[in-house]
């Protein structure tokens, strides 16, 4: 998740001591892309995501008993994040959310997310901060 309002900022969520992006499991019959959009909505209440940089993704290497996370890059014009109660848990999945710049994000995430951060930053820079700016100006103004 990125926000371009005050320069590129990445949304990180904290669960206990770990900072990560919104993510979750793909439900039976669900496509990974749809799962990613659903997980962002469920974990942050952010909707109306815009995929300015297309449908490209990056998978992490295996971690925590062989899990692999898939990350997409989406833009949100909203910055207000709510951390709703997960009905299965009875409490929010995350304790904190922050929009942070690249260097700050790098200092917060675990080693397995550093390649994801570099991929996202390169993708946003290479395919155009200008692309996002053009779309925003034209309108009037991101797992398995």
Image (tube, rainbow, N blue to C red):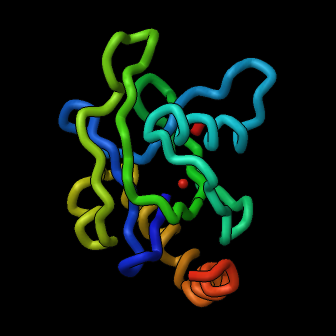
Relative placement, left or right, of 110 versus 77 is: left
Q: Residue 15's quadrant in the figure?
A: top left
Q: Is residue 40 in view from this perspective?
A: yes
**Image point 77% across, 35% down: which residue?**
31
Relative placement, left or right, of 39 versus 2 is: right
Q: How many marks?
A: 0
Q: Indicate the position of residue 65 as horizontal and vertical percent values.
A: 44, 23
- Tell me if residue 12 comes above or below residue 22 in the rendering: below
Relative placement, left or right, of 15 versus 30 is: left
- Tell me if residue 23 comes above or below residue 138 in the rendering: above
- Tell me if residue 123 comes above or below residue 114 in the rendering: below
Quadrant location, the C terminus:
top right
Q: Residue 34's quadrant in the figure?
A: top right
**Image point 59% across, 90% down: which residue?**
130
* Closer to us: 124 or 112: 124
Seen from this angle, which residue lies furthest right? 29
Q: Indicate the position of residue 104 as horizontal and vertical percent values.
A: 23, 67
Relative placement, left or right, of 49 versus 23 is: right
Q: Indicate the position of residue 1 as horizontal and vertical percent values.
A: 49, 57
């Amino acid at each position: 998740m990125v926000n371009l309002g005050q320069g590129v900022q990445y949304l990180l969520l904290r669960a206990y001591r770990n900072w990560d992006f919104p993510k979750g499991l793909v439900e039976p019959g669900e496509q990974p892309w749809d799962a990613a959009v659903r997980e962002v909505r469920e974990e942050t209440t952010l909707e109306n995501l815009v995929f300015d940089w297309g449908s490209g993704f990056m998978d992490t290497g295996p971690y925590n008993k062989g899990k692999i996370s898939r990350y997409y890059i989406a833009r949100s014009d909203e910055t207000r994040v709510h951390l709703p109660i997960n009905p299965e848990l009875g409490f929010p999945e995350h304790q904190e959310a922050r929009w942070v710049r690249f260097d700050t994000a790098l200092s917060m995430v675990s080693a397995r997310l550093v390649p994801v951060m570099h991929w996202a930053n390169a993708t946003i820079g290479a395919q155009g901060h200008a692309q996002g700016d053009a779309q925003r100006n034209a309108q009037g103004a991101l797992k398995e």
